[in-house]
Amino acid sequence: MKRNLLFVFAGVLACAIFMMAFTFADDKSPAGVITLQIGNPTMTVDGVEQPIDGDGTSPVIQGGRTLLPIRAVIEAMGGAVEWDEATQTVTLTQKSEVVKNGGVTEQIANSYSARAFMEKEVSGSDIETILKSGAKAPSARNTQPWHFTVVTNEALVTAIARGTLPGCAAIVVSGKTEEMVGINVDFDAALATQNMYMTAQDLGLGARIYTGPVQDINENKREELAIPEGYDVISVIAVGYVENIADAISGASPRNSLDDIVNYVE
Ligand SMILES: Cc1cc2nc3c(=O)[nH]c(=O)nc-3n(C[C@H](O)[C@H](O)[C@H](O)COP(=O)(O)O)c2cc1C
């Protein structure tokens, strides 16, 4: 395969112009907006026209699918593309950082808040695995001051977790209201929430954390959701299958650079 002719399936499009908007917090200033046009060997990167490559490569629609020159796109985004002839493998690297240990670091690097849920039922066994991860979270003095409510009722899930569709589930995380010296219930509940958010993604599902609906649930939906007495709702996690292509394009918001958020004391 020729290096500059690496294409990926990017979605079925009726229109001939494909626009992607990505932003990254990076001092290499990767592109904010990249526009490619079917049959056009130039692309626009942040308003500046440039050749896709030196070979006249242009996006095409093949078999109803839009194929984009991945190298040009990834490099404009500040990433890198490597082609290994021996193993016929393409490796895409964001911002030239390869995080590949098959473990939690790689999972965190690839995690994002689900955007495009699908209408497909999440299995009970997946939900149980997610709940076990929540229950495994560390907590101050091991008080485990949380309660999890699994909501699968379609109307309720879509009411409390924006963007979900039938088949998605919502896990409502509540924390004990009792005052306990040295215990910050919100903090412990947040750790349980994050464990469940990550495990859902490890299972191939999408997940999104919400605190927007918390006040409304505490004030108006406690009975409907059977929130136990002595607990207040702290977060909601939506889990469901996601439309991978749409999520891959719009997923993962930019993060501040370490230069802006870290100081070292040596
Ligand atoms: C504590 C917390 C509360 C959040 N509340 C909401 C919410 O109410 N509605 C929503 O759509 N997303 C909510 N989110 C999702 C964030 O918008 C999302 O995590 C953030 O934009 C980063 O996106 P990314 O992980 O895809 O990069 C929440 C996330 C957290 C951690």
Image (spheres, grey):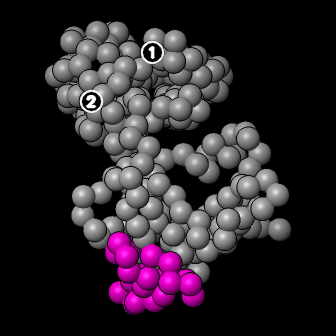
Q: Which residues are magenta?
A: 36-58
Determine whether label 2 and label 1 are within 8 Å by CB: no
The picture places residue 8, in percent across and down from the top left corner, at 51, 58
Q: Which mark is residue 165?
A: 2
**Label whose residue precedes the other's in the sequence (2 or 1):** 1
Amino acid type, mark 2: Leu
Residue lying at 53% horizontally and 32% vertically, measured from the top left: 204
Q: Label 2 CB, ligand 1: below 8 Å?
A: no
Q: Quadrant of residue 158?
A: top left
Residue lying at 19% horizontally and 20% vertically, measured from the top left: 155
The picture places residue 185, in percent across and down from the top left corner, at 49, 28
Q: Quadrant of residue 165?
A: top left
Element under label 2? loop
Which of 69 and 33 lies nearest the eye of the viewer? 69
Amino acid type, mark 1: Ser
Element under label 1? loop
The picture places residue 116, in percent across and down from the top left corner, at 34, 42
Q: Which residue is mark 1?
A: 123
Which of 247 and 107 lies nearest the eye of the viewer? 247
Asked whether residue 90 is in view, the answer is: yes
